[in-house]
Image (cartoon, grey):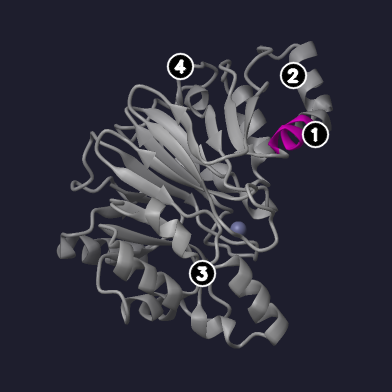
Amino acid sequence: MKVRNLFLSIMLSLGSISTVYAENSIKPATNIQETGTKVVMLGTGHPGFDSKRAGQAILIVVDKKLYLFDCGPGYMKNFNSLSKLPWMPKDTLFTNDSVYGAINKLFLTHLDSDHTLGLDEFLLRPWVQGRSTQPVIYGPKGTKNLVAQSLNAFKSDIDHRTLGSQPSNQTGYKAIVHEISKEGVVYQDAKVTVTAFKVPHGSWADGMAYGYRIQTPDKVIVLSGDTRYEERNFQFFKDADILIHEVLSDVGNKKLSPDWQKYMLEAHTTTTQLANIANIVKPKKLVLNHAIFFGQSEQSLLNEVTEIYKGDVILAEDNMIID
Ligand SMILES: [Zn+2]
């Protein structure tokens, strides 16, 4: 915790990057505005084990409305770190008028399990705590099946809660699923527009892996999803206030066997490639997400990028808030 406080002090003294952690032991920093779009890195991990990082989950908050992107394993507990923050819905149990009811919009980049193992939690935990609004889920082909099978797998739990003595409702777990098959606007409300774009990720077929570009009243946020280096992506990255991009240590990858190196380059973007991308698309802030270290330290991976790209760069960690 001391390290994080030290980090926070350094970040605040730098002044240019308003990024803090939301852990309960750290009070919200004064330079995080009470209004405006917030990005919360709820889960920043990859398929490997990492006690500091839950599975992929990025939360965007606009006027106390919550937009969740991906639901990897273990991310949901990190919502607790946001309790009492003035820009979050209130944490009141057993009512839809709460953070639980507000966890109702999910956008999946693709169906790899490091991005979806927390789907059951998204469907069930907020419902048990009071969500009665039907959640809405956007994702590629296969999302309807994943949701239906998940609810079927948990039929005993659902029956126990709806047919027994526990106060419950019959709606808050019944997700409405929209499968995405082409690029373009997939969601729009009064303040937020979400546009999906195709990305190439390993052997996933065309149209099965997406990035998202999110326009809010004060920010353009771009999420790369999982993608290899691809110049076609650049058109969707341009003019981003915050570009959250996956990354793989170039140095670490080169230590793998040739077959694994080949696979990684078909699926992911190296530190060197990402630094070159940033030099071209020039985001106001670059966030390194889904970092695959392969034995390199956090600082080493960060250095691999900053040696080539001189703009604002942040290595994402769970509970980090960016505005
Ligand atoms: Zn992944």
**Helix, strand or loop at disc 2?**
helix
Which numbered disc, 3 or 1, marks the residue that appears first in the sequence?
1
Position in image of residue 31 (x %, y %): 18, 48
Give how far apart the Cα atoms at labels 3 and 2 are: 44 Å
Identify the residue under disc 2: 161
Q: Is residue 282 magenta?
A: no
| Residue at left offset 78%, top offset 26% | 157
State the residue in front, 189 or 313: 189
Give how far apart the Cα atoms at labels 1 and 4 are: 28 Å
Give the magenta part as a residue range: 143-149
Position in image of residue 260 (x %, y %): 69, 79
**Helix, strand or loop at disc 1?**
helix
Task: Name the mark on residue 149.
Answer: 1
**Is 219 rendered above or below residue 188?**
below
Asked whether the beta carbons under mark 3 and mark 1 sit within 8 Å of each other, the answer is: no
**Is 100 rendered above or below residue 96?**
below
Q: Is residue 164 visible?
A: no
Horizontal side of 35 relative to 242 (left or right) equals left
